[in-house]
């Protein structure tokens, strides 16, 4: 039986051999992950030997759950490759007064706004990085509510924390087909002062109607487009104008903050009997609010009436009359049409 001194010599020899083996393993991992350098491997090998000597073994020889689990019959220990010290000490948490780092931030948002012809659902925000540095990646669903291919300009999407605005990163918003949906990730370059639950995502510049999505508990704000059931008819000696439905949306044109757009699809039938027909223009229509203010029709977008001929047996279809309003009063609105002879016809629509 070996004496205590002999056991000590054997233990030292075993420790040296084990240390050499572990040093070789750690050095190899360091070369693979970090590109070289073995100045820290002896210290790491000593730590691993101490852990193996003191860690309680399970029936299968694996370490306990706090230190990692083994696979098969042998235990395994995670090696922090390239770390200056095996034990970096406790990590600071937000309650310690330390600013959260970008890598620790993730927020579930699940809020919906409407802007620029899109229904936008902001689902989450998560820290990441790209070639330019640290980022916050915002997952959104873009539903195109229009009849045209559309996309959001990244210049109209701003991420802020207080007065600090963060630049858009490398991601671009896709083109979305009519009445279709695309899921997308919007990335923003951030710094170490960024706090995800204090962030606000804004669609639109300050001089337009905006949609605002706080990442924290506050509610999102935007104007949700309205669709009204309208079945009204305007009839003069020259034309009969039939309205079928109505939409109300915010304007997203520069300088039109507080402006809203009302559109009514129509069918115009010429009843004058003349061989030359007639011409229908937007300024022949007017919309009067419950408060008494009135606006005339205007061509704003493709599909709006500009100057449309109508003939006997050839109805005007697929067109809309559009109005710009500075306020939306609930109640009964009056729409009127004045034909080329000066005759006026009116109908009422109700806005809740």
Image (cartoon, rainbow, N blue to C red):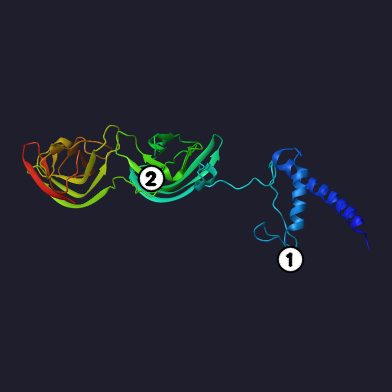
Q: Are marks 2 and 1 in contact (CB under 8 Å)?
A: no
State the mark number for residue 148. Answer: none
On the image, the x and y values in percent for residue 265 come to 22, 46
Image-based side of 28 in relation to 292, left or right: right
Dividing the picture into quadrants, the one containing residue 324 is: top left
* Of 107 and 242, the residue lying toward us: 107
Is 176 positioned to the left or the right of 326 in the image? right
Could one spot residue 277 in this view of the protein? no
**How many labels, in total?**
2
Q: What residue would you read off at disc 2?
A: 214
Q: Quadrant of the N terminus?
A: bottom right
x and y percentages locating residue 316 in the rendered image = 20, 43
Instruction: Give the Cα separation between the discs numbered 2 and 1.
Output: 50 Å
Residue found farthest to the front = 4
Judge whether 335 appears above or below 65 on screen: above
Q: Please state if 78 lies on the left or on the right of 135 as rendered.
A: right
Query: Could you tell me which secondary element the residue under label 2 belongs to?
Result: strand
Would residue 269 be visible to someone looking at this image? yes
Give the residue at x 58% y 47%: 91
- As drawn, the residue found furthest toward the top would be 255
Viewer-side residue, 119 vs 162: 162
Crowdedness near tag 2: few (<14), some (14–19) or many (≥20) residues, C-alpha within 10 Å: many
Q: Position of residue 132 (x, y in %)?
A: 54, 34
Q: Which residue is mark 1?
A: 60
Q: Residues within 10 Å of mark 1 (few under 14, many from 20)?
A: few
Judging depth in this view, the residue of 316 and 347 nearest the camera is: 347
- Compare marks 2 and 1 and give the one earlier in the sequence: 1
* Circle 1 SS class: loop
Displayed quadrant of residue 40: top right
Which residue appears farthest toward the bottom when viewing the image? Answer: 59
Residue 72, position as x, y percentages in the image: 73, 63
């Amino acid at each position: 039986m070996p004496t205590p001194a002999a056991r000590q010599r054997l233990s030292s020899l075993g420790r040296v051999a084990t240390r050499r083996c572990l040093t070789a393993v750690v050095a190899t991992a360091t070369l693979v992950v970090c590109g070289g350098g073995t100045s820290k491997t002896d210290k790491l090998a000593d730590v691993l030997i101490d852990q193996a000597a003191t860690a309680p073994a399970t029936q299968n020889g694996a370490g306990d759950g706090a230190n990692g689990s083994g696979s098969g019959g042998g235990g395994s220990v995670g090696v922090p490759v390239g770390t200056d010290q095996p034990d970096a000490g406790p990590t600071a948490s937000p309650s310690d007064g330390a600013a959260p780092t970008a890598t620790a931030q993730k927020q579930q948002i699940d809020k919906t706004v409407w802007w620029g012809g899109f229904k936008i659902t902001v689902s989450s925000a998560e820290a990441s990085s790209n070639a330019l540095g640290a980022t916050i990646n915002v997952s959104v669903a873009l539903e195109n509510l229009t009849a045209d291919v559309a996309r959001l300009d990244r210049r109209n999407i701003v991420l802020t924390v207080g007065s600090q605005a963060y630049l858009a990163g490398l991601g671009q918003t896709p083109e979305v087909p009519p009445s279709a949906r695309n899921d997308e990730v919007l990335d923003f370059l951030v710094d170490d002062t960024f706090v995800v639950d204090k962030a606000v995502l804004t669609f639109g510049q300050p001089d337009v109607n905006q949609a605002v999505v706080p990442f924290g508990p506050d509610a999102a704000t935007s104007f949700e487009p309205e669709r009204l059931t309208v079945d009204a008819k305007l009839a003069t000696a020259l034309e009969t104008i039939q309205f079928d439905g109505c939409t109300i949306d915010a304007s997203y044109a520069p300088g039109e903050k507080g402006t809203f757009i009302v559109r009514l699809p129509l069918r115009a039938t010429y009843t004058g009997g003349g061989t030359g027909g007639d011409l229908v223009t937007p300024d022949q229509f007017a919309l009067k609010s419950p408060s008494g203010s009135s606006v005339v029709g205007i061509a704003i977008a493709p599909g709006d009436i500009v100057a449309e001929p109508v003939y006997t047996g050839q109805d005007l279809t697929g067109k809309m009359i559009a109005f710009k309003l500075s306020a939306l009063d609930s109640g009964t609105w009056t729409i009127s049409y004045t034909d080329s002879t000066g005759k006026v016809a009116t109908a009422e629509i109700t806005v809740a």
